[in-house]
Every structure is written in C-alpha cells, then in structure tokens.
Amino acid sequence: MAAKGGKNQKTPATKKSTAFDSAVQTAGLTALSGKDAVEGSYRAQIKAANGWNFTGSVDMDAHFKSAEGQSNRWDYGIGISEVGGRELVCWLEPHPASSTGEVRKMLDKLAWLKEKLDAPAFKKLKALTYVPDRVGHPFYWLRTLKGECRITAHGKEAKQLAKSGLRMPAQQLTLP
C-alpha cells in the first residue's frame, strides 16, 4: 500500500483485538495503529477527547484509488474508544473550504462513503458508525490549512451539510 504524498509505506497494525480492527478486516481493508493511516500533515489537527483513545485508522482513499480512480472517495476512518467502554468510528475528510463549491464535492464524497457502509462487507463498520446513543458525530470535514473558510454557519451550504449529517469544516477536531 502506498501512502499519500509519496511518504514511506506504513506498517499494518499487528494487534487485531479491537472492534475497529475486526470491522476493517471484515471489510477487506487494512487497519493501521492509532492515526497512522492519516497523512502526517493532518495528524496534529486531530485529537481524542479526554477519556478516549484512538484504536486504529484506515485510508479508504488509498485502498480504493486503483479500482475507483474517478470516484469522489472519502479519505479516512478512525477507530476511537472510551477508556474501558464502547468503541466507534469517526470518518474524516481533509479538504479545503476556500469556496462554497467545495460543499458539493464533500457531499459527493460522503455519498460514496455511505454507499460503502451499506455494502454487506462493511456491516461491522456501519454498526460502529451508527452506535446507539453515540457521543459525537460520525462524519467530519477537516479543513485543510490552506486558504480561508468560505462556508458560513448560517448559509445554505451549512444547511446542506447538516441535512447530510456532515459537520461544518473545522481546522481542529476533537473526536468523538
């Protein structure tokens, strides 16, 4: 598996004891430890809330790039668990928010991801995405550091994002 941005190849996680690892494996994907599947330049923008730990990550974009090169693919899934408690998946997409036109691209990427989650092989990942009484949201737009954010909290684009279940773009994420 080639990492994004020409970075060195990552080593798959060796410990497969979490619900996230099992779900990723069932889907035919490769889980990496912690946030390792996330491109290094974005990792500092992603934190775990107090009492939560990252259990693994997966690079959906890299996995499906050769088979679905023209698709609007979602980038990352991150497993996160409460200390001594439940585990869930947060899906995040690093993408610029420098124009309102980026919203359509993000909604297309989200539709692609939701279609994947509806596939039988992704049943476990879907269950970790839509956990009953979930803390936090499942889908996040990680705003890249380049350019200003042109999507306003009260604009029509914000309403489109909310209707789809996608969070407004943010430069820093605290998951879940």
Image (cartoon, rainbow, N blue to C red):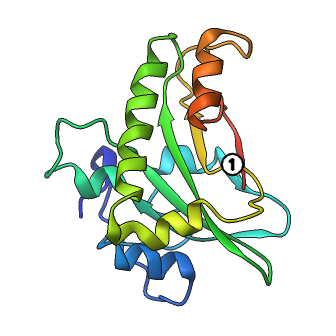
Q: Residue at x 37, y 79 (%)?
A: 25
Where residue 13 sits, quadrant-wise, is: bottom left
Where residue 32 sits, quadrant-wise, is: bottom left
How many labels sit on residues?
Answer: 1
Q: Residue at x 21, y 49 (%)?
A: 65
Where residue 79 sits, quadrant-wise, is: bottom right
Question: Badge 1 local density, few (<14 within 10 Å), some, or many (20+)?
Answer: some
Q: Quadrant of the C terminus?
A: bottom right
37 lies left or right of 5:
right
Q: Where residue 18 appears, x then y in whole percent?
A: 56, 84
Q: Considering the numbered disc 1 on the image, is that residue within a helix, a strand or a loop?
A: loop
Q: Residue at x 57, y 60 (%)?
A: 129
Residue type beneath disc 1 = His
Q: Where residue 123 appears, x then y in whole percent?
A: 43, 70
48 lies left or right of 17:
right
Q: Is residue 133 above or below residue 101?
A: below
Report the residue marked by disc 1.
137
Q: Is residue 153 above or below residue 92?
A: above
Residue 116 showing in the rendered view: yes
Residue 32 showing in the rendered view: no
Q: Where residue 98 appears, x then y in whole percent?
A: 52, 13
Closer to the camera in the image, 79 or 13: 79
Q: Where residue 29 appears, x then y in whole percent?
A: 32, 70
Closer to the camera in the image, 176 or 138: 138
Q: Residue at x 78, y 62 (%)?
A: 133
